[in-house]
Image: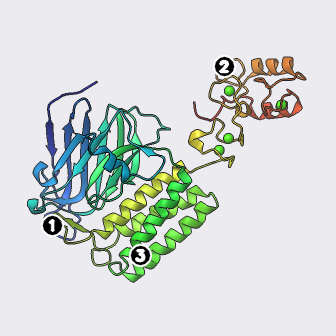
Amino acid sequence: MIRSTVLIIAIAVAQGAFARGDLPGRAPGTLTQNFAPSPYSVEVTADFAEVSNLSASSLGLTAQVISPIDMPGIVLRLPAAGVTIPAAFPVIVDITPPALGGLEFEGVAMVILDTPDLPYSPYSRLRLFSAHDGGPFVDITEEFSEGSYRVRGSQGEFSEFLIVLDERDPAAIVTTKFARLSALIATHTIAIDDTVEATLTGLLSSAQASFTVNDIDAAKVDIAAFEAAVAATTSGQVPNLWRSLEDVTNVNGLLRAAAGTLYFSLEDARDTDLDGLYDWQDNCRDIANPAQCDTDGDGFGNICDGDFDGNNIINSFDLTAMRNAFGSAGVTDTDLDCDGMTNSFDLSLFRELFGSPPGPGIP
Ligand SMILES: [Ca+2]
Ligand SMILES: [Ca+2]
Ligand SMILES: [Ca+2]
Ligand SMILES: [Ca+2]
């Protein structure tokens, strides 16, 4: 449904006594604008911890449908394979603050796109990408949530924003994001205080080592600590200012945004039972079942689905069905390990499941 064909501008700038910045006059601020580039619609929010001179004119926010002429050029700036622009939302959002508009912020700027044109699913591969100064588009997603499709990412600088479908392997995406963070530290090594840099490099190596051995939780702890360590620095240790003249580099914001999106992607790369299928694609999340055999087609693999009558609980009725099928051949619902026979191996698996609902797995 199209909300409106009229441009609606809503400005909500928070002012107050909460400024924590290095310079006076900065405060938290948020600006939301609604766009309806026919037949699509999107609400765009820019959110700052420390900003000054924030207004619709100083932010320079626009959203438009990508024209057939521009499309090939934009596609060339996406990763070479696995990333596409959804046909249901070929919209590009641009934030180009006018050089003389006076906008200044410290640390990260959060950008949130909310559109009713894309469906939400917890397993969605839709992501927020951004590009600076006509460069390549990279994933900056930190969160997406229910409702209409809502996605959030951080930036240390502004640019173009796109929602894309990213079907690349999550482990490869994580590896790319580790590399991006390392490269950022290397590029800005002169600007970063030596002690801070040693801390950050240590946390990054530790997170990478944890990821290599599939310890997603430990990697997330290190990346959260990395973000917090950068956030705790002074502007003398890590430059943290962005201003519309673009004569300084907001290293603080760049590092935190890159850490935030790495943190997000680590969850996508979690494979709890180590069977080669990520949690978000595994029909039995906690039991290894690489073949994903699911004879009743309910989304729960046989190996965690002892619920033969489909009443969502594995109980004595299911046990009766198991007994009746015991000893029979065929890959059937009661053949939990899908080896073509309902036998004592399946019964012992069934025992583990008794009293629980089927799953967990993708519903
Ligand atoms: Ca798995
Ligand atoms: Ca599994
Ligand atoms: Ca099933
Ligand atoms: Ca069996």
Three-letter code for the amino acid on which mark 3 is drawn: Ala
Q: How is colour applied across the structure in the image? A: rainbow
Judge: label 1 CB < 8 Å from ligand 1: no
Camera-nearest label, 2 or 1: 1
Question: Could you tell me which residue is drawn at 87 percent across and 23 percent down?
Answer: 329
Residue 21 at what x, y percent from top left?
A: 22, 67
Question: Could you tell me which residue is drawn at 65 percent across and 24 percent down?
Answer: 297
Q: Is residue 163 above or below residue 40?
A: below
> Could you tell which of marks 2 and 3 lies nearer the N-terminus?
3
| Residue 104 appears in the picture as rendered | yes
Question: Could you tell me which residue is drawn at 15 percent across and 49 percent down?
Answer: 13
Q: Which residue is mark 1?
A: 245
Q: Which quarter of the figure is the C terminus placed in?
A: top right
Camera-nearest label, 2 or 3: 3
Residue 38 at what x, y percent from top left?
A: 22, 31
Q: Which residue is mark 3?
A: 186
Q: Is residue 165 left or right of residue 241?
A: right
Q: CA distance from mark 2 to mark 1?
A: 63 Å
Question: Could you tell me which residue is drawn at 26 percent across and 43 percent down?
Answer: 69
| Residue 15 appears in the picture as rendered | no
Three-letter code for the amino acid on which mark 1 is drawn: Leu
> Could you tell which of marks 2 and 1 lies nearer the N-terminus?
1
Three-letter code for the amino acid on which mark 2 is drawn: Gly
Q: Is residue 335 left or right of residue 299?
A: right
Marks 1 and 3 close (CB-CB < 8 Å): no
Q: CA distance from mark 2 to mark 3?
A: 56 Å
Q: Is residue 67 above or below residue 216?
A: above
Front residue (pair 64, 243): 64
Q: Which residue is mark 2?
A: 310
